[in-house]
Image (spheres, rainbow, N blue to C red):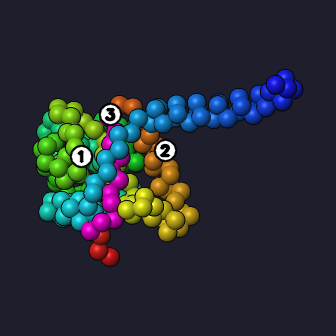
Amino acid sequence: MNKKKVWGSLPALLMVSTFFFTHASAQQREGWIEIHADRFDRVEAFFLENGCEFYQNAAFIYDSGSARFISKAEVKEVLPADADLFMEHGCSIEVSPKALSQVLSYDKRIPENTKVILFFDLAVAQDGSSVIHMLSDDLKSAYKARLAGLSKINKFEKYKVVTSLTGYNQ
């Protein structure tokens, strides 16, 4: 083996391995648990039944101890520096962790007696493609900023709900 070839490719190898290590560490720091809700209409119906609209790119705090989504005022109390990242839903959503897990097609269960962040990500098609390419540059920037800000919060377990476009009616 030619030593010059091995040493010549060493910087490239180090650069690639550093990229993968950094990328893997970033994913671990973000700490998202992904939930893939299999039907858009089921999730939307859940919100509508509670007098709410279903929004994508929207974050909420769910308090499983009191089985409800907390208000924006309560979010300001528990995460004052990050409250702007959360949606003002203007309605009361009360649901048990078990029922919420069923609505979201989550085969595990949202933990009990704790607060968790629920981020309803952009819906995806069956082939995994996102609707992000359809957004304006301003909306893409807002989406990325919200996701980056939420990713930095480590006080609560975080769930990223990726809803399928199955059952979506325009």
Q: What is the number of the mark on residue 153?
A: none
Which residue lies at the image location 21% right of the left edge and 34% below the top edge? 111
In contact (CB < 8 Å): disc 1 and disc 2: no
Q: Earlier in the sequence, mark 3 or mark 2?
A: 2
On the picture, is 99 further left or further right than 30?
left
Q: Which residues are magenta?
A: 157-167
Looking at the picture, how far across and down is residue 122, in whole percent? 40, 58
Q: Which residue is mark 1?
A: 106
Residue 145 coordinates in the image, percent (x, y): 50, 50
Amino acid under label 2?
Ala
Nearest to viewer (mark 1 / mark 2): 1
For the point 67% across and 35% down, the residue is 16
Q: Quadrant of residue 159?
A: top left
Residue at 23% x, 66% y: name it: 41
Q: Which residue is mark 2?
A: 148
| Element marked by disc 3 | loop
Q: What amino acid is found at the position of numbered circle 3 in the picture?
A: Phe
Name the residue beneath numbered marker 3.
Answer: 156
Q: Is residue 110 left or right of residue 6?
A: left
Q: Residues within 10 Å of mark 1 (few under 14, many from 20)?
A: some
Q: Residue furthest front?
A: 1
Distance CA(mark 3)–CA(mark 2): 15 Å
